[in-house]
Image (spheres, helix red, strand yellow):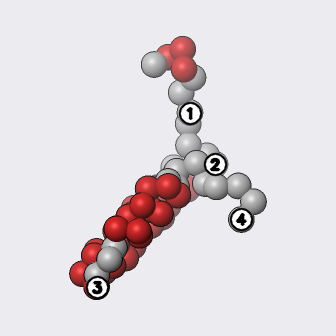
C-alpha cells in the first residue's frame, strides 16, 4: 500500500479488530466492514453518475 485512503480510518479499524475477542464481535466487525465498503461504493457510483471525477472539496475559508 502506497498511501492510506483519506476516508479509511486505519486506526479505528485496528482498534475494533483488537476488541473483537469472540465470534460474535468478529462477525459484527466483518458486517461493519461490509456495510461501510458498500456505502463507499455507492458514493463512488453516484459521483460517477453525476459526471464528477472527484468529490468537491470546500476550502477552509468557506467553513
- Residue at mark 1 to residue at mark 3: CA–CA distance: 40 Å
What crowding class fits label 1: few (fewer than 14 Cα within 10 Å), some (14-19), or many (20 or more)?
A: few
Q: Are marks 4 and 2 in contact (CB under 8 Å)?
A: no
Among numbered discs 3 and 4, the one appearing first in the sequence: 4
| Residue identifier under label 4 | 1
> On the image, numbered disc 1 is attached to which residue?
57
Mark 3 secondary-structure assignment: helix
Indicate which disc, 1 or 3, sits on the residue closer to the N terminus: 3
* Viewer-nearest of discs 2 and 1: 1
The CA distance from mark 3 to mark 2 is: 40 Å
Residue at the location (37% across, 76% down)? Answer: 30
Q: Give me the residue at 28% from left, 76% from top.
A: 25
Q: Is residue 58 above or below residue 43?
A: above
Label 2 close to label 1 by CB (< 8 Å): no
Residue 6 visible? The answer is: yes
Mark pair 1, 4: CA separation: 24 Å
Amino acid at each position: 500500500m502506497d498511501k492510506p485512503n483519506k476516508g479509511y480510518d486505519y486506526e479505528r479499524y485496528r482498534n475494533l479488530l483488537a476488541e473483537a475477542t469472540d465470534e460474535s464481535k468478529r462477525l459484527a466487525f466483518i458486517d461493519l466492514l461490509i456495510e461501510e465498503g458498500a456505502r463507499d461504493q455507492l458514493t463512488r457510483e453516484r459521483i460517477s453518475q453525476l459526471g464528477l471525477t472527484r468529490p468537491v472539496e470546500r476550502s477552509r475559508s468557506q467553513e
